[in-house]
Amino acid sequence: MTQANRKPFVGGNWKMNTDSAAALSLIDGVASGLKNDAVDVAVFPPFVYLREMSDKTSGSDMLVGAQDCWFESNGAFTGEISIEMLKDCNVKTVLTGHSERRHVIGESDQLVNKKTKAAIAGGMIAVLCVGEKLDQREAGQTDAINESQIKAGLDGVSQSDMSSVVIAYEPVWAIGTGKTATPEDAQDAHAKIRALIATMYDQSTADSTRIIYGGSMKPGNANELMAMPDIDGGLIGGASLVADDFLAIINAGQPQSV
Ligand code: PGA
């Protein structure tokens, strides 16, 4: 199967940025520039703006997503947000295991797995983020880290549930640093992740799973990254905060046949 058989997915991870006015103007800018629905486009605003962003985009194809979730549906979990609450705000997708959650906040693989399963069970697209740190890359551990994070993150996720999973390969050293993996290095990691999915499930699951790249993707490098056969889109941080830059990256993700 070629890339053209997988619908590209481009997500904008706003992280802890924007205020209410900036979020509204950013989402307006993105919505008004979308040309077609050939790419699945998602934005991941801060929790407190999710309801407003969902209301703004209702009726459009744009997906509103959350940057995190909790895995229990309710109860004494001060400060946490459940999948049910996200659904109530019309959220359709959620990031799990983003490197800032893993390495700044300290989330374990086991917690990421619980959140991933809760998101899938709640009918969301779970965007499971994986990737190696710089010292791990320099020690030649990129593929081993991806493998262990994916195996742990997808523990107990069935083959049929895999249609609700997008994998985001985000080398930690490339996130927010301006350093991007070369298209060849990124392609190599993506191809190995796809081969891993084939061993964990089967070839057809591997062929249909979207594997997107994140880490300083910008209008200037998105075309060559997304031209790679196993790169099915991007998870964009900094550049998703500027509507024109995000739109340019979405355009780079347009399938060749469109
Ligand atoms: P960046 O962030 O594009 O700013 O590197 C990517 C991400 O963290 O998802």
Image (cartoon, rainbow, N blue to C red):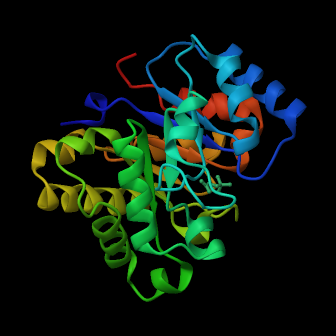
The quadrant holding residue 151 is bottom left
Q: Nearer the viewer, residue 169 or 120?
A: 120
The residue drawn where x is 70% and y is 44% is 47
Q: Residue furthest front?
A: 75
Residue 59 point in image, percent of width and height: 57, 10
Q: How many marks do you count on the picture?
A: 0
Residue 127 point in image, percent of width and height: 45, 48
The residue drawn where x is 43% and y is 19% is 38
Q: Quadrant of the N terminus?
A: top left
The quadrant holding residue 27 is top right
In the rendered view, tell whether residue 68 sits above or below residue 6: below
Q: Nearer the viewer, residue 18 or 257?
A: 18
Left or right placement of residue 4 versus residue 203 in this view: right
Residue 88 point in image, percent of width and height: 57, 30
Left or right placement of residue 210 versus residue 130 in this view: left
Residue 23 visible from this viewpoint = yes
Residue 156 point in image, percent of width and height: 23, 60
Left or right placement of residue 16 versus residue 220 in this view: right
Q: Quadrant of the C terminus?
A: top left
